[in-house]
Amino acid sequence: MKKVVVGMSGGVDSSVAALLLKQKGYEVIGIFMRNWHDSEFTLSDECPWLEDSNDALEVAESLGIPFQVMDLSVPYKQRIVDYMFEEYKNGNTPNPDILCNREIKFDLFLDAAMDLGADFVATGHYCQVDSIQTNGKQTFRLISGADSQKDQSYFLCQLSQEQLSRVLFPIGGMEKSEVRQIARENGISTAEKKDSQGLCFIGKVRLPDFLQQELQAKAGDIIEIAEDHPVYGAYKSIKDADYKALAMPFIYNSKMGKTVGRHRGAHFFTIGQRKGLSVGGTPEPLFVIATDTKNNIVYTGQGENHPGLYRKALFIAKEDIHWVRPDLALLPGKKARYETRIRYRQNLEESILFMEKEGLYIQFIHPQRAIARGQFAAWYTGNELIGSGVIQ
């Protein structure tokens, strides 16, 4: 009998994952990962980890499977929270969920499961894994979840072949409504529980409020750049063949626009953000088009179609490129067509990948909104995720 350790979060998805695995004849162990100690920050009322743990325990007991709580809070702080603070401090836009999957759930947690003698780990993610034969060996494929509204493959874009060989996603081929129905029919107590939103330890607290517990507020100027500024005319004149130039972020300085307000810290803002600027009196709403954390300046433009929000290409440094399918990795000088997204739930966009010795350039057929340094770009063919990387 194969043994599988299920990461039980206290939600309906992981609950049904455990149920389905037991029904298939696996020896199932349920483990709740405690990734955060509330006491370090004043968010104890906003992070119901104890309630979630109790819900997971109740489900495990009803299924008759062993259950335990695993405390991963120390490495979680070191690998995820500290990374998050450092990224924001440097003016980047991190995705801690992707790092959590790579560094915690499918690294430390997977290792702990193997130490328990498990053959696999399983979670309630909406994605799928299968395998094919390439060059005479087994190659694992990361496939989008069947429920397009819940597909979570993007969050798993940094997983390796070794990790994929040891994971199961029992509900990946199901619709969310089907998962809830299975839970109801089997008397699972979490059947009607609402989905969790965002990172647990942040809860309902506004992100700037959380960041201020580590990053100090520092007043600075909000500068508006006109949509007809010459910098945009220069960008539009770049030929499509010059993907390296198209991938360069816009460069601003304080003399290029007018000061329209003050902010509490450039590191609290990201490209494309509208809320939190607290600047009124403009014909159209202001959006963040760039941040300069060194000089503590937030650059803005009027309207969601401001040219400063759109670019046709991006760059990923060589050391930040990850191929889920190493057999499809591009060699320097080669190019390939894929569909790419730069954020969760964004529609896949047609793109051409150009591999150069310094890294990977991704050029889109249509300009993309709010490409931000620190985000992850993930490229697909059909419903298979091929690779990913951190945007520069």
Image (tube, rainbow, N blue to C red):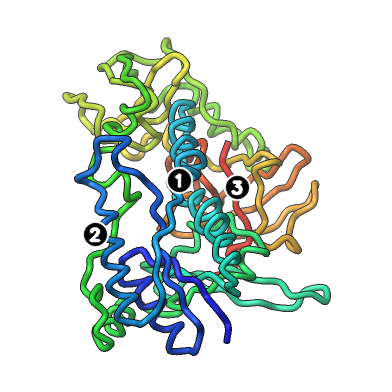
Instruction: Mark 1: give few (<14), some (14-19) or many (20+) Cα within 10 Å.
Output: some
Circles 3 and 1: CB distance less than 8 Å? no
Q: Position of residue 126 (x, y in %)?
A: 43, 70
* Residue at point 41%, 58% (across, down): 33
Between discs 2 and 1, the one toward the N terminus: 2
Residue behind mark 1: 96
Q: Position of residue 321 (x, y in %)?
A: 66, 47
Q: Position of residue 205 (x, y in %)?
A: 24, 40
Amino acid type of the residue tagged 3 in the rendering: Gly
Between discs 2 and 3, the one toward the N terminus: 2
Residue behind mark 3: 389
User: Circle 1 — which element?
Assistant: helix
- CA separation in Å, label 2 and label 1: 23 Å
- CA separation in Å, label 2 and label 3: 35 Å
Q: Quadrant of the C terminus?
A: top right
- CA separation in Å, label 3 and label 1: 14 Å
* Residue at point 34%, 20% (across, down): 216
Amino acid type of the residue tagged 2 in the rendering: Glu
Q: Quadrant of the N terminus?
A: bottom right
Amino acid type of the residue tagged 1 in the rendering: Pro
Circles 2 and 3: CB distance less than 8 Å? no
Does 296 sit above or below residue 247? Answer: above
